[in-house]
Amino acid sequence: MSKPKSQIAVGILGATGSVGQKFIQLLENHPWFEITEVVASERSAGKKYAEAANWFMPGKIPENISNLIVKKLDAKLESRILFSGLDASVAGEAEENYARAGHIVVSNSKNHRFDDDVPLLIPEVNADHLQLLKSQKYTGKIITNPNCSTIGLAMALKPLLDSFGLEQMNVVTMQAISGAGMPGLPSVTILENVIPHIGGEEAKIESEPLKILGGLENGWVKNLDLAISAQCNRVPVIDGHTESVQVKLKKNATREELINAWNSFVGEPQKLELPFAPRQPLHYFEQADYPQPRLHRNLEKGMAVSIGNVRECNLFDYKFTVLSHNTIRGAAGGAILNAELMVAKGMVG
Ligand code: NAP
């Protein structure tokens, strides 16, 4: 594994938002990355970060960030890596411009996820998809993170796919409020309530796993052939997306075999011992009423996925529950792991 000889300068695009703030919180004291630039909208540009951001993370804004002057989206930047938590309305073009200017853009936005030459990366699941970068025409690169619900789900599906094959999958999500960004939903809308619709979310969950779990053929991803149905709900939980999943497998498997496949699953980040890698990416809990967002979202600093309550299903083969932290594993933490993987593989010069 290659380790950087000195700190790599990184910038945060969309630094004032929900994901941007999480980047700032998580990157404090990171062994490889140091935030040197923050970027947001015209509303924030020109102000000190502490004045521009409505900081809502626990604890203070890290001292080295508070006084950084927020830059405009078209500003020329110096940082080698740019972590993007930009609103999707501006992310597409801005990320391309920065990649053309030579930056490595590690994005959380949906805009480039389905570009043929852009990896939709979960390092434990499809690290080999980094090969797509050889086809990118930018001087820099663009790498994307999947949707916050897709990440936990695809991680839980990967060992099942490898050991037993997947034929059909149904998922119902219960998604946290922080997934809606800042300032989020009005309290009168979400308190004591469930909203059975999240714009565009079902389509993302029904399509993204097919690219992520697809194999490489002649240097390109061949999507997995799997029928997926998704229903998405917003629930009054601050952080942590919970998902009720049903799967039909290609091969027979016992409940114990599924649990073993989850508990023993590891990928490149664990082998490379990357700084943000959870020791064990998937944890199965035997208690029938686990996992729960309040109890398990911060497992392994929010980077591990919790699974529980696997049982036989009358319609499919098995049903179970998956939980992951949407702004850590599902966004900023996942993006940091993507960048660490690239550094470890010598792809960040
Ligand atoms: P958010 O809280 O609304 O933050 C959006 C950020 O984009 C802010 O920093 C905002 O700056 C900036 N921005 C908005 N319009 C801009 C413009 N015209 N020019 C430059 N900057 C602009 O959203 P979020 O929840 O952090 O999500 C950010 C991205 O990550 C979205 O694409 C979202 O889909 C994706 N994502 C979110 C989650 C999650 O759990 N929240 C998970 C995975 C992926 P100002 O403050 O200056 O307006």
Image (cartoon, rainbow, N blue to C red):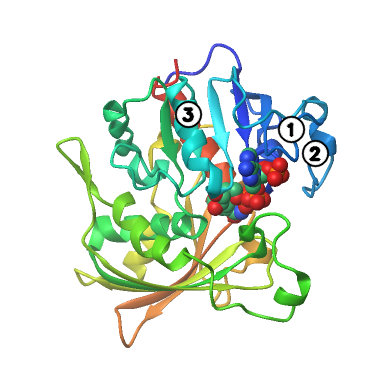
| SS at badge 1 | loop
Please, what is the three-letter code of the amino acid marked with disc 1? Ala
Q: Nearer the viewer, mark 3 or mark 2?
A: 3
- Report how far apart the C-alphas of labels 3 and 1 lie in the structure: 18 Å
Please, what is the three-letter code of the amino acid marked with disc 3? Asn
In this rendering, does residue 302 appear at all? Answer: no
Q: Nearer the viewer, residue 237 or 290?
A: 237
Q: Residue at x 69, y 36 (%)?
A: 24
Q: Residue at x 68, y 81 (%)?
A: 193
The quadrant the C terminus occupies is top left
- Residues at discs 1 and 2 in contact (Cβ within 8 Å): yes
Above/below status of 3 relative to 25 = above
* Mark 2 Cβ and ligand 1 under 8 Å apart: yes
Circle 2: is it few (<14), some (14-19), or many (20+) Cα within 10 Å? some
First-in-chain label (3 vs 1):
1
User: In this rendering, would 153 be left or right of 275?
Assistant: left
| SS at badge 2 | helix
- Report how far apart the C-alphas of labels 1 and 2 lie in the structure: 8 Å
Q: Nearer the viewer, residue 80 or 264?
A: 80
Residue at image mark 2:
52
| SS at badge 3 | helix
Residue at image mark 3:
97
User: In this rendering, would 331 be left or right of 72?
Assistant: left
Residue at image mark 1:
45
- Report how far apart the C-alphas of labels 3 and 2 lie in the structure: 24 Å
Please, what is the three-letter code of the amino acid marked with disc 2? Ala
